[in-house]
Image: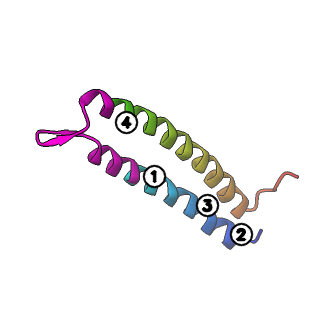
Amino acid sequence: MPPKIARLAGIGAYGACAAFIALFALLAYVSRHTATGGMTNALAAVTWISLGLVFVSLIAVHVVIGRRLMELAQGGSYPV
């Protein structure tokens, strides 16, 4: 993979992490309990925990991929 493309892909992986954080924040905001309705507090907490675990794992994978691509862009070798 050419270094310029690897660098762009690495930056894209980090950008995906930011998008995951924004999506989690939006879903947490939408699923909160309000005075006029919404989910109960218990269901909101379960939703936040379950979505949080999914988003944390996605972010961790993208950080690892982003680091590897940045290393590859700086002249690192790609293991076969």
> Which residue is at 12% across, 42% downward?
36
Question: What numbered label is drawn on residue 10?
Answer: 3
Residue 75 lies in quadrant: bottom right
- Camera-near label (1 vs 4) is 4
Q: How many circles with numbers are drawn on the protein?
A: 4
Which of the pair 36/78 is nearer the observer? 36
Mark 4, Cα crowd under 10 Å, few <14 / some 14-19 / many 20+, is some
- Which is nearer the N-term, disc 1 or disc 3? 3
Residue hosting label 4: 48
Residue hosting label 2: 3
> Residue type at mark 4?
Trp
Q: Is there CB contact under 8 Å for labels 3 and 2?
A: no
Residue 15 to residue 30: above or below: below
Which of the pair 40/14 is nearer the observer? 40
* Helix, strand or loop at mark 4: helix
* Helix, strand or loop at mark 1: helix
| C-alpha separation, residue under disc 3 versus residue under disc 4 | 28 Å
| C-alpha separation, residue under disc 1 versus residue under disc 3 | 16 Å
